[in-house]
Image: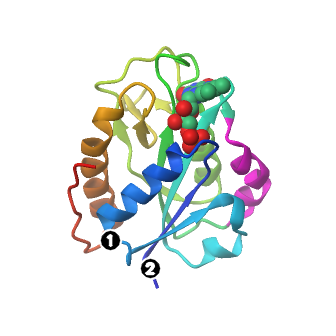
Amino acid sequence: MAQIGLFFGSDEGNTEGVAYRIAQRLGEDQVEVMDIADVTQLEFTDYQHIILGIPTWDFGQIQSDWEEFWDDIAEVDFNGKTVALFGLGDQFGYGDYFLDAMGMLHDVVLAAGAKVVGYWPTVGYEFEASKAYLPEQDCFMGLAIDEDQQEQLTAARLNQWCAQVVAEFGLAIEVRALDD
Ligand SMILES: Cc1cc2nc3c(=O)[nH]c(=O)nc-3n(C[C@H](O)[C@H](O)[C@H](O)COP(=O)(O)O)c2cc1C
């Protein structure tokens, strides 16, 4: 069985695409990629290492499939599990709500007992406000991906973040650097 469970929600396919690009870097035999629209809480029990992907929609709102799963995810026991998050947003179009949904999901899994890794520096982004911003550490609560404004930076960001997360997970996975 794959060592890592990756769960994503996506309205228009950007987050889904990034989910599979992460799997390509970590190795498709290492990661099981699942749409949050198709799973139950049970799938979460199978994995000690979990990656969650969520875009923000409609001025700071949670993507619709994640919203439907919201009560369920809060009831998952994340004790003993390590979680890394990635969020998609548009920093120029929605700079007052940049990646808010990732911040909200972060708080839910933290409260449910998860150890969260994969925090990401804010260098190279421009935004006014974000619920995914941690002022004490001047970082995002997970990888920030902007396919609307900075698509050309995504491949390198994924390469760097995947290597970081594998190390923080403590897994012996050789990460492939891709130029996709
Ligand atoms: C109507 C609309 C509202 C959006 N609202 C936000 C927002 O509040 N914050 C943000 O960071 N991005 C916002 N976005 C940008 C999306 O998060 C971004 O396009 C993302 O890549 C979509 O991911 P998906 O294709 O996986 O659904 C919005 C986009 C649209 C079209």
In the rendering, at what x and y percent does residue 10 appear? 61, 47
Of the pair 154 and 170, the residue shown nearer to us: 154
Q: Does residue 88 sit above or below 90 in this rendering? A: below
Q: How is the image coloured?
A: rainbow
Q: Does residue 166 sit above or below 9 in this rendering? A: below
Asked if residue 156 lies left or right of residue 80, the reply is left
Based on the picture, tell me whether residue 121 belongs to the magenta stretch: no
Viewer-nearest of discs 1 and 2: 1
Q: Residues within 10 Å of mark 1 (few under 14, many from 20)?
A: some
Mark closer to the chain start, 1 or 2? 2
Q: Answer whether residue 109 is visible to the viewer in this image.
A: yes
Q: Residue at x 29, y 33 (%)?
A: 152
- The magenta stretch spans which residues? 62-76
Q: Secondary structure at mark 2?
A: loop
Q: Which residue position is annotated with label 1?
A: 27
Q: Answer whether residue 131 is visible to the viewer in this image.
A: no
Of the pair 23 and 49, the residue shown nearer to us: 23
Q: Secondary structure at mark 1?
A: loop
Question: In which quarter of the view is residue 71 placed?
Answer: bottom right
Q: Which residue position is annotated with label 2?
A: 2
Numbered mark located on residue 48 in the image: none
Gap in angstroms between the C-alphas marked 1 and 2 = 10 Å
Q: Residue at x 44, y 79 (%)?
A: 2
**Ligand 1 sits in quadrant:** top right
Callout 2, which amino acid? Ala
Of the pair 37 and 118, the residue shown nearer to us: 37
Residue at mark 1: C-beta within 8 A of ligand 1: no
